[in-house]
Image: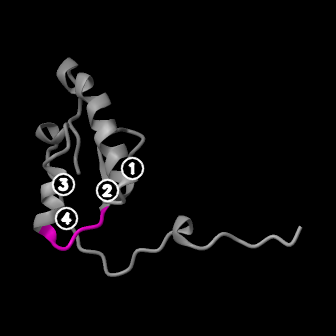
Amino acid sequence: MHLPESFDAKFMSLIPRHRAFINRMLNEKVIETYAISSDRRRGWVTINADDEAAVRGVVEQFPLFAYLHGVEIDELFIFDTVASRFPHISLN
């Protein structure tokens, strides 16, 4: 997703609601990952859904959706992370 170049007061006021929504979706395992670039211009979200329409339905619920300058949706074939692996066993 592409974020605006500058943030007005209305955008800033929506951030707490947006973060609460993202946190709820993370807890419900609808969203797997959420990241924003250090320059705050782009974001990446990994969403568990059946199809592109379902993903778009989640993204359109983002409180900041009206401010996004484009959303690209790509279906993943493989998604592997360290966090999704079993923890290492320690014999100590």
Q: Is residue 11 left or right of residue 53?
A: right
Residue beneath disc 2: 45
Q: Is residue 91 left or right of residue 78?
A: right
Sequence-earlier tag: 4 or 1: 1
Q: For residue 79, what is the image quadrant?
A: bottom left
What's the residue type where badge 3 is placed? Val
Sequence-earlier tag: 2 or 4: 2
Q: Nearer the viewer, mark 3 or mark 1?
A: 3
**Mark drawn on residue 72:** none
Circle 1 crowding by C-alpha within 10 Å: few under 14, some 14–19, many from 20: few
Majority secondary structure of magenta residues: loop
Write the start and end of the magenta stretch as one range.
47-52
Disc 2 to disc 4, how far (Cα)? Answer: 10 Å
Circle 4 crowding by C-alpha within 10 Å: few under 14, some 14–19, many from 20: some
Residue beneath disc 1: 35
Residue occupying the point 36% across, 60% down: 29
Residue beneath disc 4: 73
Q: Identify whether 3 is placed above or below 76.
A: above
What's the residue type where badge 1 is placed? Ala
